Amino acid sequence: HLPAAQTQARVYDELEELEKLMDEYVHFSSTQPDNLPRLQELVLAKVAEANLQDEVTYDEEKPFDEYVMNLHNYITDLKNMEVHTGLHIMGQPPEDQQLEDYLWLLLRLDNGNIPSLTQAIAALYGFDYYYLLENSSLIYEPLNITYGMLIDRIANQCRELIRCLQQRDFVKEAVADALQLPWVQQVPAESREKLEVVCNYIVDTLYPNLLLTKQEITNMLRGFEGEYIEPGPSGAPSSGGADLLPTGRNFYGVDPRCLPTPAAWEIGKTLGDQVVERFIAEEGHYPENIGMVFWSGANMRSHGQCIAEFLYLMGIRPKYQSGSLRINGLEVISLMELKRPRIDVTARISGLFRDTMPSVMQVMDKAVLLAAEQDEPDDLNFVRKHIQEDTRELEQQEGMEHAAAWRQAAFRVFGDAQGTYGAGVAALLESKNWETIDDIADVYVRWGGHAYGGKTKGKFLPQQFRKRMGSLDITIKNEDNHETNMLSSDDYNAYHGGMIAAVRSIKGSAPRSYCGDSTDRTRVTMHSVQEEAKRLFRSEAINPKFIKGMMQHGYKGAADMANMIAHSFQWDATSAVMEDWMYEKYAEKYTFDPAVQEWLRDVNPWALQRMTEILLEAEQRGLWQAKPETKEELQKLYLDMEGELEDRADEH
């Protein structure tokens, strides 16, 4: 299906006020320095009100200007995130404002030879768009506005260009009209040519393909009749893949024998380097053990970026067959070239990964064995170090022969038993059938403790998997698109959050946990799980745009809002990502707001009851120190909803 409607997040409430204060500070810093002390106090007060102290730390020993720049960059990042503004209705193309938002979203990145619309317009001002994002508090002197304000201006011009085409129903002649916009006429001819290319792409390709969304229904009906359906590639349209449209086709994935591709290998290396560099910055030494979550769909879309990162962290690279570019072997990256130790990596694969990528699992297993074979010092080859230690333990404690012990100690690919799927954690949390983090860890180990490698296909080795989890310094799950995120589904927490919970329980301390983001292949980034949760919470979960978007979809929209609270709570149970003010905001925006509450009572009172129940559970389990008045109001609301639902049941 076409992804759900999305648009630019923007900012609201305290963040909007803070942004205005910072813009004022930046302007006064050069013209009215006497006003700066007052503005500094106002900025810090607003930061405290918006609960931003942990995201951007204020160091009194450093210039306040530096703090303002970091704060400005953080808010600019939030403003320009993609936020869902509704659900996709099967077979229905986007229309009106949603169409404008959708086209702009699809054009934010390069699409093959079609340039990014935002980059093309940023170039008119002489800038790279990402430079503006990373330096949003600087002043663009020709207009006397901050770079952040210039980004807003660029966004408005992108929309104006699309709107001009839309008003003429995307006829070919509309391109000439768009190029006659006053600000377009003022730019050099070469820049106008880029804009013309984008406009022609919208009119000739993008809009017609969006209209074909209706074939999602017609082709599904054809499929039920066993008729032919045109094939098409799979992936994420909003991540530079607009050429994947139209939807409703018989999409295909990739040949797993070609994963990772050479391009994915380079991105995987970048992801690996970022993880190691950040861990060293935070902990002061190299990580020895890393746990990674592997999903099939993500590696199909990204052509094996996570697989590449797995290999690269251990210092192993793929060898490609000329012509077909299939993986036909592995080679060791020398320590001199690697410039760091070989890091031990444990994979927790999904059931679908197991079923669709058996050849990849063999490559991963061979990479572990190859790294372990290298005769290198323990402090430069953590893979060999740990396998040797575990081999000796198996020989001494279980009496295994050396070869069998080595083979078992070298398993690094774990997942569900054959024919089963999931991580078990989501069902456990939803059923409330747990008391401590240890219960979550036990379920995670029980479901994921099946080893794969060589001739072994799902051997149950829970003690070894538990030992691997208890050794992890880092956990990772990468994302390759923004069409879903860690709060969209309980699977994200079940796999990655479950791994974090297992480490917390078995090791006794929390690992460093990261989310790599390769949505934009030219700008791979990484956030901690806690940082990503707050970014999504601020930009989407409590964003009025998101709430209003869900309110367009009645029963299902209400259910998805309840799921947002449920997923946040579940992440908190496994990974401690929520803070008190975040729960308070959920109560304020989702359950206490009069308009939202009235709508929920009307379209889906069960969702409102579930929201209050989850929030009260968070308080009861000690995850949230609720304000007394908030707790009391939630309890009243829950009892009220319970009575209302009983009355409804009696009526039927």
Image (tube, helix red, strand yellow):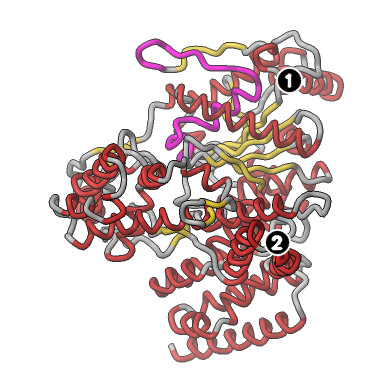
Q: Which residues are magenta?
A: 297-325
The Cα atoms of the two marked residues, 2 and 1, are separated by 51 Å
Q: Position of residue 17 (x, y in %)?
A: 60, 70
Q: Which mark is residue 33?
A: 2
Q: Is residue 604 left or right of residue 450?
A: left
Q: Residue placed farthest to the top in the image?
A: 375
Magenta includes 319?
yes
Badge 1 amino acid: Pro
- The residue at which mark 1 appears reads as 341
Q: Is residue 455 above or below residue 598?
A: above
Q: Position of residue 250 (x, y in %)?
A: 27, 42
Q: Nearer the viewer, residue 176 or 24?
A: 24
Label 1 SS: loop
Residue at 58%, 47% in the rendered image: 135
Q: Position of residue 578 (x, y in %)?
A: 69, 61
Q: Which mark is residue 265?
A: none
Q: Position of residue 45 (x, y in %)?
A: 73, 69
Q: Is residue 174 left or right of residue 427?
A: left
Label 2 SS: helix
Q: Nearer the viewer, residue 359 or 267?
A: 267
Mark 2 or 1: the one toward you:
2
Whether residue 10 is visible:
yes
Residues at badges 2 and 1 in contact (C-beta under 8 Å)? no
Residue at 25%, 38% in the rendered image: 231
Residue at 49%, 80% in the rendered image: 600
Q: Is residue 370 above or below residue 6?
A: above
Mark with earlier residue (2, 1): 2
Magenta includes 299?
yes
